[in-house]
Image (cartoon, rainbow, N blue to C red):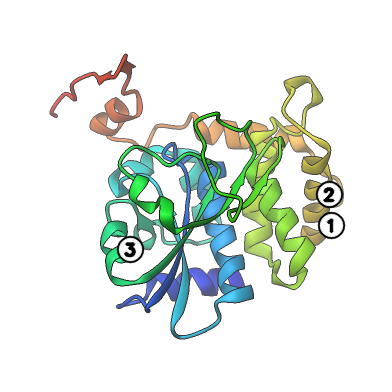
Amino acid sequence: MDSFLKYILKITALLQLPKNVHIILGNESCDLDSTVSALSLSYFMHESRNRSENSVALPVLNVKKDEFDLRVENCYVLDKIGINRSALFYRDTLNMKDLVNKHNVKVTLVDHHVLASGQEYLKPNVIGIFDHRPLDPNANWSDSINMKMELVGSCTTLITNKIYSNHSNLMCPSLAEILYDTIIFDTIGLSPQAGKVKDLDIEMSKKLEEFLQIQHPNHQTLFNKLWAEHNNVSHLTPKQLLMKDLKFVGNFVLKETRL
């Protein structure tokens, strides 16, 4: 078991959270990029800055626990490296509002830079942002916030660059694998024709290929496999299929059918 998996096992086994908590919060879509960004950056923050019994960095997947299984490519990528998904922290299994009231809480946002509706109470605690999308005009952050925003194909590219630029010794096989999968998936196999890939995506993917000792990478084959998993709903129940296909009309969600 490598250091990343040991970190995940350690935080998911906590019976009580310490006084100082650093939340790494993904976006509400909880797609593969958001999920892996939250997991990988929390590992980096914990191992490089918070190695103390009185502090912990926690990845929070910004979706309800019972909805995570609908993100089938997320499940596939995490299952490959042996992460127990049921033990992770979700927005309905970790009371962030209670944490803010009772603990010393810092928050870093990944793969978004505008807090979701109902999570605005976290704003005074936000100290950092990693995002790869254009700046939203509604974003209103002070100059004290550590913002890393760059138009690249995947937010995990920024996290990978952060690790290699500061503590490359923290890279390990399971972490490199999920970072690599996500960059390839988000950039459509590093395809220039797709219009998503940037120079930094290519640079970081090459570093990960070297680390993973991938001699002859076939980016399109890997993307096709991940895309196939994205579309694989064979294991979902009828209710989960309805939830996965839930549509919004204006500000209203179509009523859920009870099964």
**Quadrant containing the C terminus in the rendered view:** top left
Label annotation for residue 170: none
In the displayed structure, 246 sits above or below 149; it is above
x then y, percent, for residue 72:
45, 39
Q: Secondary structure at mark 2?
A: helix
Residue ID for mark 3: 100
Residue ID for mark 2: 206
**CB under 8 Å between discs 2 and 1:** yes
How packed is label 3: few (under 14 Cα within 10 Å), some, or many (20 or more)? some
Looking at the picture, which amino acid does disc 1 mark? Glu
Q: Secondary structure at mark 1?
A: helix
Is 206 left or right of 177, judged from the image as shown?
Answer: right
Looking at the picture, which amino acid does disc 3 mark? Val
Residue ID for mark 1: 210
**CB under 8 Å between discs 3 and 1:** no
Q: Earlier in the sequence, mark 3 or mark 2?
A: 3
Residue 176, image quadrant: bottom right
Task: Identify the residue at image location x=42%, y=70%.
Answer: 21
| Any part of residue 180 in sight | no
Front in this rendered view, residue 222 or 167: 167
Q: Secondary structure at mark 3?
A: helix
Q: Count the marks.
A: 3
Is 5 left or right of 66, judged from the image as shown?
Answer: right
What is the CA distance from the residue labelled 3 to the residue labelled 1?
A: 41 Å
